[in-house]
Structure formats: structure tokens, C-alpha cells
Image (cartoon, rainbow, N blue to C red):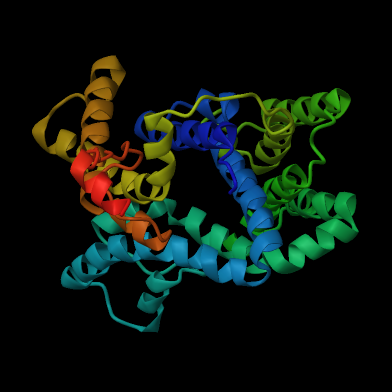
């Protein structure tokens, strides 16, 4: 039986919490301190490589089976709501069932579903992984350099490719570094390479700030380079991490939290605007974070069990609970005596 890597679980849990806090606060420093999206793609690549080694091409079906049901729960709410307020029906609405391109949205959900790009890109990388893993194992260095080179060309030439192609260039390198982690190629830490990547990313960010300053989400090339340095360090180690209920819950419900956190944040912000409650400053951020966390807990309790079903686990309100053992009373002495006859 395989044992879970608790350190990878810790990275995923921190990334999930960081994404929620970032979208709630807009603190640009978080994109530097912990580039969560690149880390999530790297972890996804590592786990996908492990699945391909174990199941072959069937790993793609298994991964899709785990991703899509939680998405369908959300769009089962969002799509009827959008159709009810005027979204025009056409075939592109069906993309919400398998969003390889950006499906149409309107009203509240136009903003509430803004983070769905992550699932779109994740689906593409899952589908491409059987070919990508073969290419990586034959030409590891070249394979990793291709997405970074493509992003450099896009940046320097001022190109505007379709969002999917741009994001594959931006996060494809992190996915392939996840392959390298699975194959044990990151154990030898090359600090000079980490330093070069971090320095190049920092230099590009400082000389090409985005509309929100040094928020790396607005500076793709800096984001990719800085994130690569971060991944080399974060996945180049494997410290012992003790299992905990918090890690279990956050990992078993990571997709539910990600899918629902933006609609919750948008709803809370609109309520604050309507009611006149403070939005910014420590008071505004504090109460909004508390309410967002509470609402996400309720959503996890309500629909998080779908992730259990998708993963083939027994549904539970909160995973990780210790199983109660029913004590077995010893057989009476007379029964033992009779069984010996």
C-alpha cells in the first residue's frame, strides 16, 4: 500500500489557503512569498506522472473522473442562474461541462467564475500528459525549456496568443518540473540555477511592473521564472511532516474550496457594498476573511462529499475522522468449552 506524502499535502494545503487569502485581500506580496498557482501545477504534474506510471493512459480518465463532478455541482447552480437572468443559450454553454475553452458567463457569475481558467488549463495538461511525459523522459531538459522559451518569445515579441496557449507556456514549465520531481531529478539542488532564475524573475518584475505594481500575476515572465526557482527549492526537499486532520480536510476538499471561493468572495464584497460595511483596511479585510472562511466551511459540509464519491472514497462530511472500533466481547467459557467438542 502506498503511503501519502504528507509534505506534498502540506504544500497543497498552503497553496489552497494562500489562493483564498490572496483573492480576498489582493495582497501582491503573496504572489512573491508563495507563488501558489505554479506550485499547484507542479504538484499536479508530479501526481499525474505517478498516475501514468501506475495506470498508463487510463490515468487520464481517472483524473478527469476526480475533477469533473465537483465542477458539475458548481455549474449546476451557476448555469441555470445565468440562463434565468438572460444568458443566451448556444452550444458554448455546454463547455461548462468540460471547459477546454472559456464558456460564456453573465451577471454575478461573470466575476464569480473568473478563476475557472485554472481548471481549464489543468484539463488541458491532464489530456496532454501521456505525450508530455514520454517527451520529458526522452528529452528532459529540452522539454522543460520549451514552455519557458515559448513564454519568452510571447513576451518579447508582444504576441497575444489564445489564453490557453499563453497559460500552457506560463504554467507548462511548472507541470514538467512536477514530472522531474516524481522522477527524482530535483533531489540534487542546483543553487546556482535557483539563484539565476530568481534573479532574472526579480529583475524582470522590477523593470516591467504591472498595473498592480509587483504582483507577479500581472507579469507572466517574472512569474514563471520566480516560480521555477521556488519550485526547485520547495520540491527539492522532502521533510517529514506529521499527519494532521487539518491537512487531511484541506487536501480532500481542495477542489471544492477552489471552485467556490471566488463566488463566495464576490458575494461577500457585494453585500459589503450594499450594506455600507467597510471593505478595505484591516477591519474590512478582517471581517470579510472571517465570513468567507465560515461560508466556505458550510459549502464544504454541503457539497464537499462529492470529492469523496469522485475519488471512490466513502462520503463523509469531514474526512479524516478516526474510525470507531466496536469492542468484541469475549465468548463465554461454556461456549468455548462446547466448541472444543
What residue appears at the point 21 percent right and 47 percent down from the top-left corner?
335
Q: Nearer the viewer, residue 287 or 301?
A: 301
Quarter holding residue 234? top right
- Check the image and report above or below for 82 versus 264: below
Q: Is residue 171 left or right of residue 326?
A: right
Quarter holding residue 186? top right
Residue 164, given in percent of the width and then of the height, sits at 60, 62
Q: How many marks?
A: 0
What residue appears at the point 86 percent right and 52 percent down from the top-left corner?
140
Q: Is residue 192 left or right of residue 94?
A: right
- Check the image and report above or below for 224 versus 175: above
Residue 117, given in percent of the width and then of the height, sits at 49, 56
Name the residue furthest top: 282
What residue appears at the point 22 percent right and 39 percent down from the top-left corner?
333
Residue 114, given in percent of the width and then of the height, sits at 40, 53
The answer to whether residue 332 is visible is no
The answer to whether residue 142 is visible is yes
Name the residue furthest front: 341
Name the residue furthest bottom: 91
Q: Quadrant of the C terminus?
A: bottom left
- Check the image and report above or below for 40 versus 161: above
Name the residue furthest left: 275
Q: Nearer the viewer, residue 4 or 111?
A: 4
- Check the image and report above or below for 200 versus 53: above
What residue appears at the point 40 percent right and 78 percent down from the top-left corner?
92
Quarter holding residue 320? top left
Residue 120, given in percent of the width and then of the height, sits at 51, 61
Amino acid at each position: 500500500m502506498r503511503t501519502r506524502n504528507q509534505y506534498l499535502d502540506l504544500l497543497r494545503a498552503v497553496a489552497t489557503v494562500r489562493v483564498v487569502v490572496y483573492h480576498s485581500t489582493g495582497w501582491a506580496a503573496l504572489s512573491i512569498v508563495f507563488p501558489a498557482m505554479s506550485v499547484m501545477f507542479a504538484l499536479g504534474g508530479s501526481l499525474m506522472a505517478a498516475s501514468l506510471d501506475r495506470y498508463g493512459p487510463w490515468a487520464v480518465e481517472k483524473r478527469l473522473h476526480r475533477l469533473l463532478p465537483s465542477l458539475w455541482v458548481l455549474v449546476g447552480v451557476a448555469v441555470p442562474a445565468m440562463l434565468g437572468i438572460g444568458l443566451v443559450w448556444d452550444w458554448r454553454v455546454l463547455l461548462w461541462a468540460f471547459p477546454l475553452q472559456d464558456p460564456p458567463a453573465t451577471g454575478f457569475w461573470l466575476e464569480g467564475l473568473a478563476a475557472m481558467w485554472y481548471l481549464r488549463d489543468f484539463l488541458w495538461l491532464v489530456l496532454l500528459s501521456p505525450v508530455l511525459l514520454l517527451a520529458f523522459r526522452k528529452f528532459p531538459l529540452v522539454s522543460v525549456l520549451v514552455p519557458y522559451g515559448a513564454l519568452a518569445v510571447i513576451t518579447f515579441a508582444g504576441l497575444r496568443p489564445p489564453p490557453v496557449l499563453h497559460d500552457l507556456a506560463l504554467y507548462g514549465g511548472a507541470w514538467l518540473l512536477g514530472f522531474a520531481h516524481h522522477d527524482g531529478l530535483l533531489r540534487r539542488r542546483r543553487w546556482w540555477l535557483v539563484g539565476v532564475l530568481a534573479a532574472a524573475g526579480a529583475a524582470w518584475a522590477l523593470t516591467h511592473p504591472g498595473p498592480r505594481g509587483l504582483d507577479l500575476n500581472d507579469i507572466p515572465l517574472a512569474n514563471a521564472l520566480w516560480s521555477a526557482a521556488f519550485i526547485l527549492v520547495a520540491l527539492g526537499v522532502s521533510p517529514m511532516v506529521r499527519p494532521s486532520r487539518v491537512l487531511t480536510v484541506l487536501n480532500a476538499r481542495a477542489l471544492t474550496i477552489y471552485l467556490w471561493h471566488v463566488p463566495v468572495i464576490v458575494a461577500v464584497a457585494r453585500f459589503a457594498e450594499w450594506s455600507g460595511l467597510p471593505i478595505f483596511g484591516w477591519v474590512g479585510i478582517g471581517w470579510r476573511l472571517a465570513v468567507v472562511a465560515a461560508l466556505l466551511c458550510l459549502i464544504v459540509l454541503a457539497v464537499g462529499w462529492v470529492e469523496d464519491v469522485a475519488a471512490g472514497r466513502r462520503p463523509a462530511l469531514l474526512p479524516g475522522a478516526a474510525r470507531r472500533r466496536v469492542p468484541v466481547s469475549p465468548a463465554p467459557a461454556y461456549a468455548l468449552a462446547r466448541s472444543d467438542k
